[in-house]
Image (cartoon, rainbow, N blue to C red):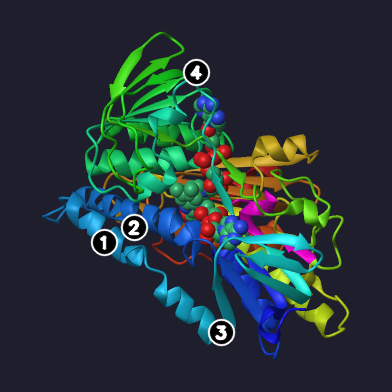
Amino acid sequence: MSDATDEFDVIVIGAGPTGENAAQYAIAGSDRTAALIESELVGGECSYWACMPSKALLLPGALADRAGAMGGLDGTELDPAGVLERRDAFTRHWDDASQVAWATDAGIEVIRGAGRLTGEREVTVGERTLRARHAVVLATGSEAVIPDIPGLRAARPWTNRDATALRAVPGTVLVLGGGVVACEAATWLATLGAGVIMVVRGRSLLPAAEPFAGERVAEALRRRGVQIRFGTELTEVTRDLPAGADPAPGAPREAPATCTLSDGTELIVDEIVVAAGRRPRTDDLGLDAAGLPPGTGIEVDDQLRVRGAEDWLYACGDVNGRAALTHMGKYQARVAGDVIAARAEGRPLEGSRYAASADHGQIPQVVFTEPEVASVGPTAAAAREAGHDIAEIELDIAVAGSSLARDDYAGRAKLVIDRATDTILGATFVGPDIAELLHAATIAVVGKVPLETLWHAVPAYPTVSEIWLRLLERARVDRG
Ligand SMILES: Cc1cc2nc3c(=O)[nH]c(=O)nc-3n(C[C@H](O)[C@H](O)[C@H](O)COP(=O)(O)OP(=O)(O)OC[C@H]3O[C@@H](n4cnc5c(N)ncnc54)[C@H](O)[C@@H]3O)c2cc1C
Ligand SMILES: NC(=O)c1ccc[n+]([C@@H]2O[C@H](COP(=O)([O-])OP(=O)(O)OC[C@H]3O[C@@H](n4cnc5c(N)ncnc54)[C@H](O)[C@@H]3O)[C@@H](O)[C@H]2O)c1
């Protein structure tokens, strides 16, 4: 029988942004106890090898670019060493002390080690067996997929961990993939001075976005000197590396790699960045103890309860495969935390806060390329495929606010409108510094605000948001 310290009301495995929020919400305002188990750094992939370092690497380049396109400014040079130092500050030099302190202050006990389910409501960490009175939450995130290409794994390619933790700017880099990680990494690597070649098996970048988004990002990358090889696969890699332990994240590899492409081209590069998607981290999680198959995705309901173990097991964030974004993982964690709290207190699960609905077609995302791509809800193609009768409004962004923002401003906006309800299903904005425009669209989409009502949401002059007025005017004209 375990002693008192081994029993908690809630046990969370994985202390990324999702796990932190699940623990916090499950015990907030109560005397419940929570254990937060972490095998690496409290703060997770997002804080140390994903969102934070990547944005710290990208935004100085975007600002330098903007300054270069603004008459009357002098001094727009980027200092790569300074950018890497600033990135180090944002990752707190890969030290999680402040996040551990946050958890402790919130009444959460941090336990170091790999957590594993060993039975119903039971988790083992090293020698310790922990029992949960109310719930166990899986929040173990995801990891980069290394495609099964001959020689690739042995060539020790960079993943997002290396690309975000880079110690020095490589001379030449092959980026494998055309999705979000690939486009962002190609942007910061090229901006910092690397020669970048993207190998993209499809015909466009950012294939999940509206087509004009990928086209504009590709044009901008090419202007920065990035070569993009569409319709091409990496077929083989050879690299003569000395045997030894895995290098630290971001360390340069000790020999160049020879990469053979499907069109027969051979490229010799200093680094290969693999950005070919992610898989849930479930391998050693003991899913079989909960009656689930190991190494696969975990199916949850809208309360984030794991199907087949609804009484006690929850899964939130990247690990459940619903929406691999930090803000969506945290949203799910808030829902799961509220559900756990209500069930622990015997309260009914009444009200929308107890169901994750935004995952169903209302997901906002910003891709921090140059130009940025900000979107919420489905693309026109996805909306049509889902059976909606839609109208599409698409315009260049050319308003007073945009002309003031930079001398060479170029942007485009699109609304996908549901004809039956006269509301916006999806919106996409592509342009420099466009990220902050997105939340207005998210509110319109989630609130199902009719266009008639939006007419009275007057954008301030002179801001880029005036594009909303242009879009609504066009919608009026189109409807006659
Ligand atoms: C390069 C890159 C840039 C990104 N940029 C953005 C962005 O700008 N905005 C955005 O919204 N999203 C971004 N993402 C996605 C974002 O990083 C993830 O959606 C987010 O980190 C998911 O959070 P999580 O808490 O679910 O998982 P994670 O952040 O992966 O955290 C999971 C934690 O669980 C731990 N763990 C795993 N297994 C165990 C175990 N058995 N026992 C104990 N601990 C365990 C891990 O060590 C880790 O700390 C980016 C991703 C990448 C790769
Ligand atoms: N700013 C942000 O919000 C942000 C930034 C980075 C990552 N993320 C999240 O992280 C997740 C993972 O991003 P990602 O870019 O790794 O995945 P992704 O699914 O967006 O893109 C993967 C790309 O790799 C390609 N690919 C897969 N296998 C391949 C192979 N064998 N050879 C060549 N290409 C191959 C795919 O065709 C696709 O274009 C995304 O879902 C995204 O939401 C978000």
Q: Is residue 189 above or below residue 17?
A: above
In terms of depth relative to the viewer, which is nearer, 281 or 333? 281
Compared with 128, 389 (above or below) is above
Name which residue type carries label 2: Ala
Pointer 2: residues within 10 angstroms few (<14), some, or many (20+)? many
Q: Marks 3 and 1, Cα distance to the nearest angstrom?
A: 28 Å
The label number, if any, that marks residue 47 in the structure image: none
Q: Does any atom of ligand 1 lie closer than 8 Å to the CB of label 1?
A: no
The answer to whether marks 3 and 4 mark residues whose Cβ atoms lie closer than 8 Å is no
Cα separation between marks 4 and 1: 36 Å
Q: CA distance from mark 3 to mark 4?
A: 50 Å
SS class of the residue under badge 3?
loop
Q: What range of the chain is rendered magenta?
A: 313-324
First in sequence, mark 3 or 1: give its number.
Answer: 1
Q: Which residue in the protein does label 4 denote?
A: 231
Q: As rendered, which of 305 and 356 lies closer to the eye?
A: 305
SS at mark 4 in the image = loop
Residue 86 - label:
1
> Residue beneath label 2, please?
56
**Which amino acid type corresponds to the residue marked 4 in the rendered image?**
Gly
Tag 2–tag 1 contact (CB < 8 Å): yes
* Residue occupied by mark 3: 106
Q: 392 or 91: nearer the eye?
A: 91
Earlier-in-chain disc, 2 versus 1: 2
Instruction: Find residue 276 and report its horizontal and vertical position in percent.
Output: 52, 34
Q: Closer to us: mark 3 or mark 1?
A: 3
